[in-house]
C-alpha cells in the first residue's frame, strides 16, 4: 500500500507538500506562498494544478485522491467505448 510522504517547513513544522506515488502516477498536494490555507493538487501528465476546496491537509489529500480516481475511471470508460 502506498503512503503519503509529507514535506514540512523546517521553521514552522507545518506540512508544505504531500506526495503519493502509485506506479507511474505522482499525485502532489501542495500550497503556494502567499495563497494562505489554500491547497492545490497536481499530477504530471494527467492534470495541471487544481485548487482544492478543503483547507485541511487530510481532507485535501482525500479530495485529490478521489479526483485522480475519477479521471482514471473516465479514461478507462473512454477506452472501453472505443473498442
Image: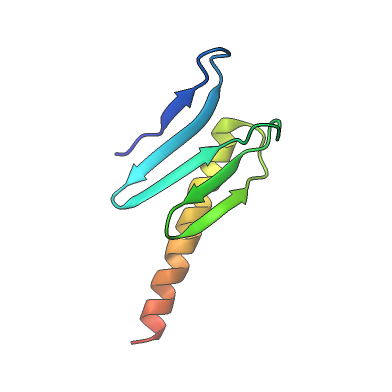
Residue 5: x %, y % from top left: 39, 30
Q: Residue at x 50, y 15 (%)?
A: 10
Q: Quadrant of residue 56?
A: top right
Specify the farthest residue to the top.
11
Left or right relative to 34: residue 3:
left
What color scheme is it?
rainbow
Quadrant containing the C terminus in the rendered view:
bottom left
Residue 16: x %, y % from top left: 54, 28
Q: Disc count in the image? A: 0
Rendered view: 19 above or below 14: below
Q: Quadrant of residue 81?
A: bottom left
Q: Residue at x 32, y 47 (%)?
A: 22
Specify the farthest residue to the front.
33
Left or right relative to 22: residue 35:
right
Q: Residue at x 62, y 36 (%)?
A: 32
Q: Choose between 10 and 64: the one closer to the eye.
A: 10
Residue 41: x %, y % from top left: 54, 46
Rendered view: 39 above or below 22: above
Amino acid at each position: 500500500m502506498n503512503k503519503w510522504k509529507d514535506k514540512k517547513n523546517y521553521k514552522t513544522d507545518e506540512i508544505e507538500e504531500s506526495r503519493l506515488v502509485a506506479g507511474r502516477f505522482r499525485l502532489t498536494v501542495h500550497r503556494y506562498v502567499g495563497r494562505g490555507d489554500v491547497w492545490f493538487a497536481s499530477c504530471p501528465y494527467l492534470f495541471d494544478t487544481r485548487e482544492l476546496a478543503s483547507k485541511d491537509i487530510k481532507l485535501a489529500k482525500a479530495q485529490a485522491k478521489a479526483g485522480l480516481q475519477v479521471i482514471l475511471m473516465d479514461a478507462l470508460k473512454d477506452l472501453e467505448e472505443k473498442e
